[in-house]
Amino acid sequence: MDNCMKDLEILWDEKTIEKHIKLIAKDIDTKWQNEPIVNLIPVLTGGMVFGTKLMIELESLSPKKWLVNPIIASAYEYSYNPDKPEVIHVSDYETKFTKGTPSILVDDLLDTGITLSIVKNIIHEITQSTVEVAVLVDKIAKRSTDISPDYTCFTLDNDYWLVGYGMDDKGLMRGLNSIGYLVNAPAEFDESLNQLAD
């Protein structure tokens, strides 16, 4: 095994992940079956892999229902400061969501909850409609807000440093087709993090 993978412990393999994505896609589709349009909002960069897989499943269940508009948001990049999350939007994002249309934020990880709480409020102010949250992993160990996901594939009650399927180590390993954790994650990750803490 390559040196960069030797400290990686797999939690969920590709087959397991895809099975759970199909399950929550069915739940989402069933709930919004009577709605003509639903905003699907992947939170980049972490949510791009999960968001892509989920939108493919949703489109196969109900074609021409899902209006996809990504948003860029991060609680921290290379310096950890969860009290001042950075929210960056694509230009003219306010015009891309129709008032009265429900929305689903799609992200890889719900960690502290700070960033997703802010983004959820922003989208609600624009649409004046329901805003739900779908995450690949609900990591509850460091939750500092009362936000909880409406749809989740997996729940984790510890502080593992997760990589794969959109989650990263300083920008690396996002493209792994499984989700694992770094066994020997250094303590300085607590001070200088790159993984999105949404």
Image (cartoon, grey):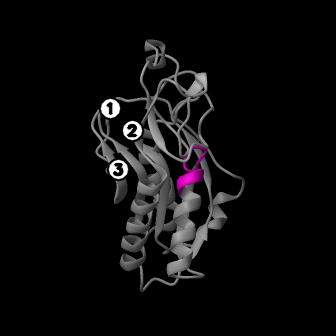
Which numbered disc covers residue 142? 1
Spatial CA span between label 1 and label 3: 16 Å
Q: Earlier in the sequence, mark 1 or mark 2?
A: 2
Determine the secondary structure under disc 2. loop
Residue 41 horizontal/vertical position (percent): 55, 60
Which class describes the residues within 10 Å of circle 1: few (<14), some (14-19), or many (20+)?
A: some
Residue lying at 55% horizontally and 58% vertically, measured from the top left? 51
Q: Which residue is mark 3?
A: 154
The residue range painted magenta reads 44-50
Q: CA distance from mark 1 to mark 2?
A: 6 Å
Quarter assignment of residue 9? top left
Image quadrant in which the N terminus is located: top right
Q: Secondary structure at mark 3?
A: strand
- Is the residue marked by circle 3 packed among few (<14), some (14-19), or many (20+) residues within 10 Å? some
- Which amino acid does the dot numbered 2 rest on? Asp
Q: Which label belongs to residue 111? A: 2
Determine if residue 132 is in view.
no
The number of callouts visible is 3
Q: CA distance from mark 2 to mark 3?
A: 12 Å
